Structure formats: C-alpha cells, structure tokens
Amino acid sequence: MFIGLSTICLILAFGFAVSAKLNPGKNHGAVSALLVVATIAFFLFAAVRVIPPGHIGVQVYFGKVRSEPLGEGMHVINPLLSVTTMSIRTQEYTMVARASEGRVQGDDSIPLFTKDTMRLNADVTVIFRTEPSLAPWLYQTMGSEEDFINKVIRPASRSAFRKAARNYTMLELMGEMRDVLEDDIQKYVKYYVDEIAKNSLGFKGGEPFVIQEVMVRNIEPPASFKAAVEAKLIADQDAQKMKFVLQKESQEAERKKIEAQGIAAFQRIVRQGIDEQLLRWKGIEATQELAKSQNTKIVVIGGKNGLPLILNEGETAKK
C-alpha cells in the first residue's frame, strides 16, 4: 500500500515540478516539494514490517520466495518486498460428526473398517504446529495455511486413522486399546506428512509439521451393535434382579426352617420333662391351693387318672 502511495506522490511531484517550470508564477514548486517529502515518507513506511507474536513472515520479491523467514517483531526491509505472515502457533484440526465443530460443516467424522470388518465412524482432533524454518518452503509449494492444512493435515490424518484401525477389532477400539490407537494414528500421520513433503518440489529435508498429539474424541459403533449391547445390559439387569429375588426367597426359606427347628426342639424338651408323676404332683399342688380358697369347693379324692376331682357348689347341686 505504501509503495503505491509513494509512487503516486512521486508522479504527482514530477508533474508539479514540470508545471512550475512552465508556469513560474504559480506555486507548483512548493507543492512538488511536499509531494517529494510524502513520497520519501511512504517509501520509509513501506520498508518497515511488523510480524505479530506467534507468526513468521515469508518474503516475496517480484514473485520469488526468499528462504529466510522474518521472526516476530519489527523489521526494516527492502520496500519492494511483500511479506505474508504464517502462524507457527499450536493449531488443531478437528473432524467430527457434529456440524457445530470442526472446519468442515456437516458430518466430517472418519469412516473406517476394523480388523473384524466392522464399519465405524470416529471423531478425531489433530494437534500440530508449523516448523518456522520451513514456512517459506511451505508457502512456495503449497500456498496459504488453509491450503496446506487441506492438502496435508486433513488427508494424512484420515488415512492414518483408517490404517491404524485395521489393526484392531471393534471391541478393542471401544475398550482398552484406545490409547494405543492414538499412538498408532500419531505415528501414521507423521509418516504420511513426511511422505508428502519428500515428494514435494524443492524439499531439502526437515519436518514441516510437528504432530504434537492425536486425540480420538469418539468412536460410534453400528446401530445393530448398540442395540445388541443395550439388550445385553437389560438382560444382565434382569438376571441380577432375579438372582436377588431368589436369594431373598432362599434366605426366607432358611429363616422359616430355623424357626421350625427351634419350635420342634422346644416341644421335644417340654415333652421329655413332663411325665405322669410330675402331672400328679402338679395336680396335688393345685388341689392344695384350691383348698385354701374361700369359695365352697368339694374335692373328690381318687378321680380320673388318680387326680383329685374339684367341684364347686353349683355343680354339686345340679348333680
């Protein structure tokens, strides 16, 4: 922008200078001088570049990319150079089924097949950053940040996930092998990125993208598998419930058995302790107690089973 303004000012200054010579009476010379000062000022502004934090500057001179990037801060450079900034901060690229996340709208989850030929959909996030020293080469061979993300990070991540998933069964991916899967994906992403870089024009070695981490957000199993799992869980719950009921009934039956055994034992003890002599003795004791009563009683000795027969006065009268 400043180069364009300085060029315009320079042309205008030249025009006013010519006009001042042709028309000495007019003040075109002063205007020409001011325009020259403005040209110099704009030219100096064009020579200053400020690279924001977390970015790198790629210098382009008449269509040719320079290999030396500009770091953060202010730089005084050739005003004829154009500078394109590229981020070297940690970035994430997310591919999920939900339309509210990720850079691609709609379902962008990764379809894949497992070792046991089960088809799954997975959500994944790749954490990466650009190597600063290779930013000029990336810009020259792939273009803007969005270009190299779409050309490298996205296809490499999706291919890596599919390749890694083929080493495991569906149950392994859904369970204890999840962390191992992430490590495998990260290894394969790095491999594919390096392969793309090696086959690119003018590559001189190095690692253009540093893959910091790969996170498997979610693995969506087939609908039939989810239905089978839900059915199994319901069956397990029913089995546990029936087991509890049977255990409770068994405990109740055991309690009744113990109670019956106690009653039977009590009855045996009582029967063993009661004999004919004891009953007669208890009858005699009862007779003695009744004899002490103030009510009129008639006691007949030698009643049934040898026990005294006790009659009150009313019963005697009836007889």
Image (cartoon, helix red, strand yellow):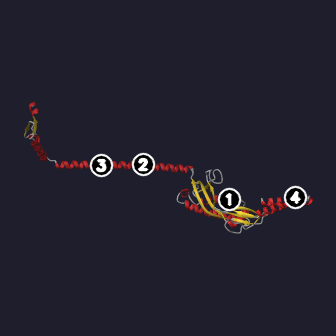
Q: Nearer the viewer, mark 2 or mark 1?
A: 1
Residue 20 locus on image (x, y percent)? 89, 59
Q: How many C-alpha atoms fall within 10 Å of the one at disc 4: few (<14), some, or many (≥20)?
A: many
State the residue lying farthest toward the right.
22
Alpha carbon distance from label 3 to label 1? 77 Å
Residue 42 locus on image (x, y percent)? 78, 61
Alpha carbon distance from label 2 to label 4? 103 Å
Which residue position holds label 1?
Answer: 149
Residue at 60% x, 57% y: name it.
Answer: 124
136 horizontally vs 292: left or right: right
Q: Is residue 137 visible?
A: no
Q: Is residue 252 visible?
A: yes
Residue 10 locus on image (x, y percent)? 84, 61
Local secondary structure at mark 3? helix
Callout 3 touching callout 1 (CB < 8 Å): no
User: Which of the 4 image quadrants contains residue 46?
Assistant: bottom right
Checking the image for residue 257, the label placed there is 3
Q: How many C-alpha atoms fall within 10 Å of the one at disc 2: few (<14), some, or many (≥20)?
A: few
- Rendered view: 14 above or below 230: below
Q: How many C-alpha atoms fall within 10 Å of the one at disc 1: few (<14), some, or many (≥20)?
A: some
Along the polypeptide, which appears first: circle 3 or circle 4? 4
Local secondary structure at mark 2? helix
Q: What kind of residue is marked 2?
A: Lys
Local secondary structure at mark 1? helix
Alpha carbon distance from label 1 to label 4? 55 Å
Which residue position holds label 2?
Answer: 241
Q: Nearer the viewer, mark 2 or mark 3?
A: 2
Residue at 55% x, 59% y: name it.
Answer: 178
Alpha carbon distance from label 2 to label 3? 24 Å
